Image (tube, helix red, strand yellow):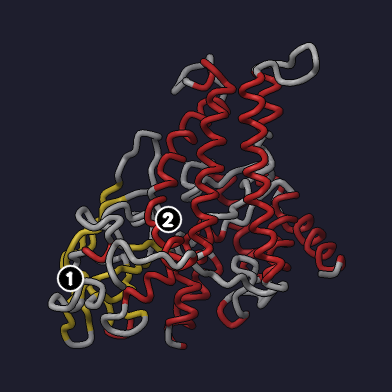
Amino acid sequence: MSDGFATSVKAWVADNLPEALKGVDIGMYGPSSLEPEILEAFELWRRRLAEQGWGAPTWPEEYGGAGLAGAEAKIIAREIHAAGSMNPIPFLAGMGVTMVGPTLMEYGTEEQKTRHLPGMASGAVRWCLGLSEPNAGSDLASLATRAVQEGDHWILNGQKTWTSGADKSQWCGALVRTDPDAAKRNGISFLMLPMDQTSIETRPIRLIAGESPFCETFFNSAQAGADDMLGELNDGWSVIKRLLQHERASQTSAPPTSNKVEPLQDLARNYIGLGPDGTLADSDLRSRLADHLMDAAAHTLTIGRIMAEAKGGNVEVSATASILKNSATDVAQDRSELLLEIMGNQGLGWEGAEFSGGELHSVREWLGTKAMSIYGGSYEVQKNIIAKNILGLPETTQKG
């Protein structure tokens, strides 16, 4: 990659990034809690990025992207991060840019692509996914939500849970049962439907960590158009397997959203102090901290190797995403555990003036990372995928 592209990106970011956004984190699921002037700045930044096609830079230009290679997209992300900011579009699009969009490009009709992809790439349209149900979590194929075709519409009835951003989304991609008599993986389809229907009810779920993106979603004779099925009738299992591969890939390499993330080793020096020999005073913690930093570096280098093997193009999403998903989970959970240990009593606060904002955030982050080994397919589900599709071990769960 020529230095000229990096130089031009750096200059563009310097000219277009609103000063008010430097160091501001949009939050994992949207900017709703930010001040009005910051929201206005984020909207301006979103529009400018969308005009460049940089919300989803590797997507074709006709679908709202910039038609760039993966290496170029990485430079854009690096320069935005170096300027102290982030690209808000993948967050504002919900599940659109990272999951639904890439799957739509593989399985969608040209009309579906033209209708949906530009809104995702610009961050103007937010998507959620109706997958898990109260009785169908990791065993997703046990879902019971039904869809029956009536004329030029599908009528949906059932309940989904853990639907991230359902209360803020304009569209939903839902996995539904369309043939109740078929084997459970063979009678499932993937439907796309608008969320602005009185027949769809969302109820936010509050989590112990505080603010939550999750909702219960109820379909009470909700409608999807007959042409809103992604992929073939009763072949939704193929579609969702591919979509979940894209999800796992998106969860393996997300960089910090601002430049305010302080290295663990610096925090350890500040909270614990150094011994007479200039090393961290707690030798056991020093050893475990070194192990963690090596694991984090190895994870990052593995992602870099996969990018390099792609020879500058888009990385092929495969079962290896399951390895990186579990690796990313280990690194994130280990970091949060070590951070609370380093902070000692200051890492146990929930509220109060005696705790800094960073300390209070760290407690919530620690609780939040516990979910990483569950969402996006549990840690154990990823191990099954690795065993079957990479190691070639016998199927031990169920066929399909």
Taking the image as shown, residue 299 lies to the left or right of residue 388, namely right
Image height check: is 272 above or below 142?
above
Q: Amino acid at mark 1?
A: Arg
Taking the image as shown, residue 296 lies to the left or right of residue 164, namely right
Q: Earlier in the sequence, mark 2 or mark 1?
A: 1
Image height check: is 15 above or below 281?
below
Quarter location, residue 48: bottom right
Residue 146 - label? 1
> Foreground: 261 or 291?
291
Circles 2 and 1, Cβ within 8 Å, touching? The answer is: no
Q: Residue at x 66, y 46 (%)?
A: 21
Image height check: is 97 above or below 201?
below
Q: Residue at x 44, y 23 (%)?
A: 350
Quarter location, residue 35: top right
Location of mark 2 (residue): 383
Question: What is the count of numbered marks?
Answer: 2
> Foreground: 327 or 26?
327
Q: 10 Å neighbourhood of mark 2: few (<14), some, or many (≥20)?
A: some
**What x and y, as percent, mark residue 221?**
16, 69
